[in-house]
Image (cartoon, grey):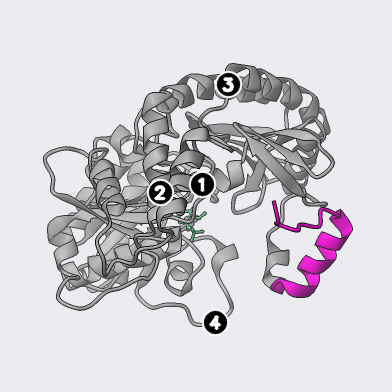
Amino acid sequence: MTLDLDWDYERTARRRERFLSPSLRTFTAFDAPLLLRKGKGAHVWDADGRRYLDCLAQNLCISVGYDHPGVNAAVAEQMRSIQHVTTMYYHPGPAQFAEELVATMPPGHDWVVHLVNSGAEAIDLAVLVARLFTGHFEMLTLRNSYHGMHFGTMAASGLALCHQPLAGAPGYVHVHNPDLYRGAYGDRVDGYVDDLRRVIDSSTPGAVAGMIVEPIQGYGGVIPVPDGYQRRVAQIVRDAGGLYISDEVQTGFGRTGSHFWAFEADGVVPDAIVVSKGIGNGFPLAALIVRRDVAEAMAARKFFNTYGSNPMACAAGRAVLRAIADEDLQGNAGRVGELFGEALERGARRCEAVGQVRGRGLMRGIEFVADRASRAPDDAAAARVQEALRERGVIVGRSGQYKNVLRINPPLCVSADDAAQFADALDGALAHA
Ligand code: PMP
């Protein structure tokens, strides 16, 4: 190995501060971030050799597990033959991968795949095709949503942390998100649906290019949209001339346990979906899966993105799909996800600082409040529990508009024993809430 890596904690911190962009300072996990050296399955090791159960999975990128032999072998084999083939040439990898992705989509529709490198890139592309196909401009997204931090996606995102103090990309309108715990219309789903109609009537020309929805808001604090919401808003948006787009960046690839894609649970068929993160098990890879007739709207003009068909990334993607099928990882997400859910429910019964637990499969959240009556967010309690879990060898994320929600999203290969370790750790950590 000739990587020549310096594993000293202080020197790494100093180099990062000196040579990497200052904006990295705005997003670190823990008071003293971990220096991670290796991963295996659902676990990571720090530079001192301490092992952690990773219930954040690099923000849900590690889907089938660290150091997965199938993914490793596929990427290594591809790397040895040719590392990159741009879209100007033919290579079977991207074409076969696209065929396999299309097979995961609802039958009876003509889907095509556009491969890109990141979630934000795929969202931007979705907005572009929606505008070209419909001839309308306005895009609707939900408050509290996260769709990325590029120029367009920053405006699409409905979380304050995504907004810079300057004029954003035009044509994005935010709608009240159906958060039944702390949303504007409380637990009245009709209120949120009605808000969408009112926004279209008041803040758009009456017609829209589309709407993007995360079936479970991830960075927003693990907030599932209520049953039936997607079906109802898809209809309203289509009546206004727009497309319904599901952002499956966090919820896809079997993570919710019951379905491969989270939109399926609501019986809605979107016009396009955006996928990333778990698609490559850590490889930079994302895609827009979209109706062919919609995608044709972009074919009148040239489009090119350099890494939109990298064969190593596609080899990783194909190996991920194979692993999910061969190892029944969606089933595992459902079964082990229940165990995580039970541990969180037990914690909520014992600990007054827990306002609500939410989620499905291996996408779970636990929200901390100063008291249950006022529901005042308690980010300090969430931070203390997060640190206490780390001391007990468990990594979780912290997010939500008020940073008071812990996110539990381990790799899909996490085991029942891991869930038991999580339950024990949570038991002790909640005493610090
Ligand atoms: N959509 C969702 C739901 C996401 O969680 C993210 C990233 N966390 C994105 C889009 C943007 O992805 P990326 O960071 O790869 O640009």
Residue 166 - label: 4
C-alpha separation, residue under disc 2 versus residue under disc 4: 25 Å
For badge 4, the amino acid type reads Leu
C-alpha separation, residue under disc 3 versus residue under disc 2: 27 Å
Left or right, 397 with reference to 205: right
User: Earlier along the polypeptide chain: callout 4 or callout 1?
Assistant: 4
The residue beneath circle 1 is 218
Residue 361 lies, in percent from the top left, at 47, 28
> Does ligand 1 reach within 8 Å of label 2's beta carbon?
yes
User: Earlier along the polypeptide chain: callout 2 or callout 4?
Assistant: 4
For the residue pair 351 and 190, the one nearer the viewer reads as 351
Whether residues under marks 2 and 1 lie with C-beta atoms below 8 angstroms apart, the answer is: yes
Left or right, 277 with reference to 315: right
For badge 2, the amino acid type reads Glu
C-alpha separation, residue under disc 4 versus residue under disc 1: 25 Å
Left or right, 425 with reference to 288: right
Left or right, 341 with reference to 300: right
The residue beneath circle 2 is 214
> Does ligand 1 reach within 8 Å of label 1's beta carbon?
yes
Residue 82 lies, in percent from the top left, at 40, 58
The residue beneath circle 3 is 415
Residue 276 lies, in percent from the top left, at 43, 51
Secondary structure at numbered mark 2: loop
Residue plotted at (66% across, 25% down): 348
For the residue pair 129 and 401, the one nearer the viewer reads as 129
- Residues in magenta, as a range: 1-22
Asked if one can make out residue 30 in the rendered structure from this viewpoint, the answer is yes
Report the quarter where the C terminus lies.
top right
Residue 112 lies, in percent from the top left, at 21, 53
Q: Is residue 155 magenta?
A: no
C-alpha separation, residue under disc 3 versus residue under disc 4: 46 Å
Asked if one can make out residue 276 in the rendered structure from this viewpoint, the answer is no
